[in-house]
Image (cartoon, grey):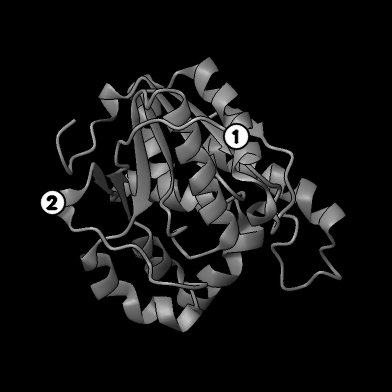
Amino acid sequence: MTRGEARPDRIRTLLGVWAHPDDEAYLSSGLMAAVRRAGGRVVVVTATRGEHGTDDPQRWPPERLAPHRERELRDSLAVVGVHEHRWLPHRDGELADLPLAAGADALVGVLEELRPDTVVTFGPDGMTGHDDHRAVSRWTTEAWRLTGQRGELWYATLTPEFHDEWGHLNEEVGLWFAGRPPSTPQADLAAHLHLTGRRLTQKHRALRAHASQTRGLEDLVGATVYRRWWADESFVAAPRVAARRLG
């Protein structure tokens, strides 16, 4: 795969591993759609139902929000042609409390079954710094290493150009939970997609399907800005190291 240039036609099986419904839409819906258009298989694993993802828990208690977000995820994936999805049985906001071995173990089975040639997930930074995101990155990385580092593991990242253009807005909306957000020069990327036209409209629809999470933000900044904000998807390859054993 050409450095910095996504070649979805070379991805036969793409596996995405994420913490909450809507993570996959923000960070990889363009890539997923491209792989599907090229005839590849895409499978998404989500660790939680995102049942605490609300500022109004009285209106949206966990037992109501969880099935709602399940439907949103199903609808969002359908927009980009993805119909294979798996849930992990974990609770929103509690992933960092699970031992690494427990988190990685379920993903080892998925990797052994699917044998994807490309896996996408959060980097160690968790993108926004969210503890659940960081935990999923650790689990996925461990599972990939334990299964022999077959295929490529890509971490979702951002570029200096993204920060230059959108830094003020990111700060205004409080996008970063903690720590420094990722920033990878374009020359170091494993793949980069810049979506325009129908491709960007498709991603926008995938994001809008997660209305419980995205509607308020889009209303705040306006549809035109919101579309442009998330028009790029960038990935950096995880380093290959000696495999470790669980335990």
Q: Quarter of the image containing the C terminus?
A: top right
Choose mark 1 or mark 2, whichever is in front.
1
Q: Which residue is mark 2?
A: 187
Q: Could you say where residue 83 lies in the image, as x and y percent from the top left?
A: 57, 27
Does 105 appear above or below 73? Answer: above
User: Along the line of sight, which residue is nearer the eye, 85 or 106?
Assistant: 106
Structural distance between the alpha carbons of marks 1 and 2 = 37 Å
The residue lying furthest to the front in this view is 247
**Left or right of 199, for residue 205:** right
Q: Which residue is mark 1?
A: 247
Query: In this rendering, does residue 204 appear at all?
Result: no
Give the residue drawn at x 47%, y 72%.
176
Give the residue drawn at x 36%, y 19%.
12
The type of residue carrying mark 1 is: Gly
* Badge 2 density bin: few <14, some 14–19, many ≥20, Cα 10 Å: few
The type of residue carrying mark 2 is: Ala
Q: Could you say where residue 34 lies in the image, as x and y percent from the top left?
A: 34, 33
Give the residue drawn at x 33%, y 77%.
167
User: Along the line of sight, which residue is nearer the eye, 124 or 19?
Assistant: 124
Q: Which badge, 1 or 2, is on the more N-terminal residue?
A: 2
Q: Could you say where residue 171 lies in the image, as x and y percent from the top left?
A: 42, 81
Give the residue drawn at x 68%, y 47%.
48
Provide the secondary structure element on which disc 1 rests: loop
| Image quadrant assignment for residue 107 | top right
Does 162 appear above or below 107? Answer: below
User: Along the line of sight, which residue is nearer the eye, 215 or 123?
Assistant: 123
Q: Could you say where residue 51 lies in the image, as x and y percent from the top left?
A: 75, 55
Provide the secondary structure element on which disc 2 rests: helix
